[in-house]
Image (cartoon, rainbow, N blue to C red):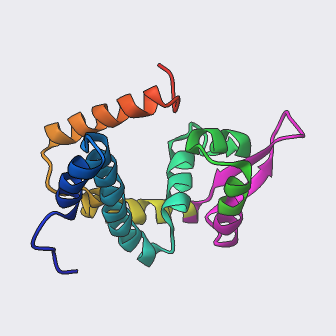
Amino acid sequence: MTPLPFDPIARAAELWDDRVGSATAMAAVTSVMRVQQIIQSAVDAALKPHGLTFARYEALVLLYFSRKGALPMRVMGERLQLHPTSVTNIVDRLESDGLVRRTPHPTDRRTTLVEITDAGLQRRESATAAVVDVNLGLKGLTDRQTEQLTDLLAKVRRASGDFED
């Protein structure tokens, strides 16, 4: 894609200021949304050769980070902040690809565990190398600036009720 010779968000902010009022929030939100598109595109491109979407990759990473390589589907939904139907669809696809398996919970018959397989561990490892190689799509910032960005976005998430601490 050829870069534009000007920043369209800055131009929109000028027009917003003239016609609507303060453009501070509009420019920030539009910038965040555009950066999300850029990052998503880079991550999708890195994961595609591994047969994964970001949602499926996140699920594999979550299971890899768990103590036993397995979690109840309900817990996966909570941690990934997804609706149960979305978790089911992700797990269905990962299971059909042989990357996870459903197992009965040893003490709670109502609960199904999702366990990462050896193939899932290998796929997670190669996919992680691919996304790390593109810095998860984040370009143009120092490590310190990336930490500051993370802190600022956490403030928005906290204020919106995304988490408490």
Question: Residue 110's x, y, as percent?
Answer: 88, 40
| Residue range of the region highlighted in magenta in the rendering | 91-119
- Compared with 85, 165 (above or below) is above
Q: How many numbered marks, from 0 up?
A: 0
Viewer-nearest residue: 34 or 42: 34
Task: Residue 123: give x, y in percent of width and height.
Answer: 48, 65
Q: Quadrant of residue 76?
A: top right
What residue occupies the far front of the structure in this picture?
19
Residue 65 in magenta?
no
- For the point 28% across and 53% down, the residue is 31
Extreme residue toward the left, this view = 5
Residue 65, horizontal then vertical, whole percent: 50, 42
Q: Residue 63: x, y in percent?
A: 57, 47
Is the residue 66 above or below the residue 151 in the image?
Answer: below
Q: Residue at x 62, y 48 (%)?
A: 82
The quadrant holding residue 22 is top left
The answer to whether 116 appears left or right of 33 in the picture is: right
